[in-house]
Image: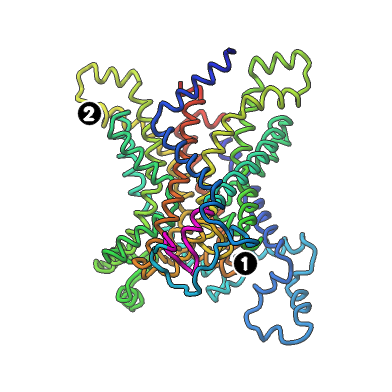
Amino acid sequence: MSVQKTEFKRMIRRYFKSPTNLLGTVLLILFVIIAILAPVICPPKAGADPFKIPIATWSAAPQAPSADHPFGVIGGRDIFYGVIWGTRAAFKIGLVVSLISSVIGLIIGSISAYFGGWVDEIMMRITDIFMSIPFLVAAMIMTTILGKGLDKVMVALIIFGWMRVARLIRGNILQAKSEQYVLAAKALGIPDWKIIVKHILPNTIFPVLVQISMRIGSLVITAASLSFLGVGAEPGYADWGTILSYSRNWMTELSKSWFAILYPGVAMILFVLAWNLVGDGLRDTFDPKMK
Amino acid sequence: MTAYIIRRLLILPIILLGITLIIFSMIWMLGPDRLLASYIKSPEALKTPDAKERLIAKYGLDQPIPTQYLKWLGNILKGDFGYSNIAKKPVQEAIAERLPYTLELAMWAIIPVIVGGIWLGVISGTHHNQPLDHGIRIFSLIGWSMPDFVFGLLILLLFYTVLGWFPPGYLSYESEAILRSAEWHKYTNMATIDSILNLNFSVFVDAFRHLIGPILTIAYLWWAYVLRITRSSMLEVLKKDYIRTARAKGLAENVVINKHARKNALIPVVTVAGGMLVSLLAGVVIVESVFNRPGIGRFTADAATQLDYFSILGSALVFSVILVLVNLIVDISYAFIDPRIRLS
């Protein structure tokens, strides 16, 4: 068995030693199972968009949980259906946004660090400018302008979500530039781009993966916040924030609509908690400084 | 040091210009038709057949982009942010009216965030890996994973619907009537401060009662952040030689922690406080919407849902300028504390 394999095994063992890491992983696996089984748990009507919560009743008033609707009904929509399919929506938002924005950040950070000089200066000032608009406010304006819909929310989150990764990658590459193995590769006459792609990026990719897992939770919160404020997904979309936004209309009678806050709220807290625990655990396990 | 400050001040206008460019590009994406809607105050204006084309030309919406940008920028520099349809007055006036409410909330909220976060962090750090440490970390991690609007709604559910203690909104009708009366002197437009200066204790209590829900929400969500920094910096300091010396010379444990360790552990906390204030200001968009507080955050959210473009852009600009200025102040003051920053 190679040294790398035993080292990897040791890391896995160290990761699962912590009870919080274990809890996070178990929660995450549970959510994955719910997302995969969504069509089995709550079969959508044939031919209909599964992400549209079917209308249970035309009355807007909240209805307490019953045998037919275990989590109750609000805005005429079945909350149970929304919570189950909302898991898929949450994974979609978190994974798509964090992956695409990280790739953009990776490209911009690499170019900036590789060329250096005025290219670096301009790119980093652009990064600064994008970072100077508060994330939630920027995403809110962008979604308002693009129009309603979860895909537009994701575009907005990507446009204003690449800067941290760009800075991280740039810093890592600049640091790696003076490392022995890079200097050795340079001395061998290997072209710069090949050094970046083959030697530097593989060594800096792990912090990025940790960053991705830690960001997914907050991205899901931001997307839900937009839906809650009424600029995110369209009404009736199976998304936790959208269901929660219905309770805004029942603010004075929250005692009659508590289930519309509790169930999607708890689902969301657990989802975000799972990612935060996993992200924290990955950082502690793989960051050499923590050893 | 001077060179560092000069460098930062020279970049400042570029950043601000860049922000206006991004914001302008976003409105420009709307196209002339949708933008025109923001200029029209009554449906009468559109009665004549070619009214739309005429109005688009009148407001310069068909001109080349750079011309439109410079015109818009010129207006902004003159202090004209456009007309707000939801507030029914110029955007700059609407924002100036609402900003004190938001600053008031941020000001009161930052106190429990910092005090509570540090307190929990120190306990957590001194009880490293003991049950108390685990308990505090789980408590704060749940807070960190909690969407602000969900927690806000839960607070409302408990303290308003069930217990009836802390209502949403800004002031009760009685207090609002007092604020409108002739004897009331407006010093800061923040009800909690003005009520103290006017020596009106009942208004203070009323204003504060409306503030507790939002403060609790913000505090719980941010404790995790302050706690984490305090805890790890406390753990680092406790390993230092001078702590061992202090213990070796027989000092009581609480003296070691309170006098020697905590002060040094707080340096990193001070440096993140500024950045936190900025994030906290942006977070008020949600908190103000949940608790129905008439600040700039709720104004932005309302403007966004009702597609009132000039209000959205004006408030985005204000938020960004606050963010840039606070960051500048924090960075410069940090450079004073830590000389290593100046060199990079």
**How was the colour assigned to the protein in this rendering?**
rainbow
Q: Is residue B52 above or below residue B315?
A: below
Q: Is residue A271 above or below residue B95?
A: above
In this image, B223 relative to A41: left or right?
left
Can residue B238 be seen?
yes
Q: Which residues are magenta?
A: A68-86
Q: Position of residue A99 (x, y in %)?
A: 63, 41
Which residue is at the front of the view, B294 or B335? Answer: B294
Q: Chain of mark 2?
A: B
Q: Which residue is mark 1?
A: B309
Q: Is residue B294 above or below residue B7?
A: below
Q: Amino acid at mark 2?
A: Val
Identify the disc placed on residue B154: none
In this image, B101 relative to B316: left or right?
left
Q: Which residue is mark 2?
A: B255
Q: Position of residue A5 (x, y in %)?
A: 57, 17
Q: Amino acid at mark 1?
A: Tyr
- Tell me, yes or no, whether the highlighted magenta stretch contains residue A36: no
Whether pointer 1 and pointer 2 mark residues with C-beta atoms closer than 8 Å, the reply is: no
Q: Chain of mark 1?
A: B
Which residue is at the front of the view, B270 or A190? Answer: A190
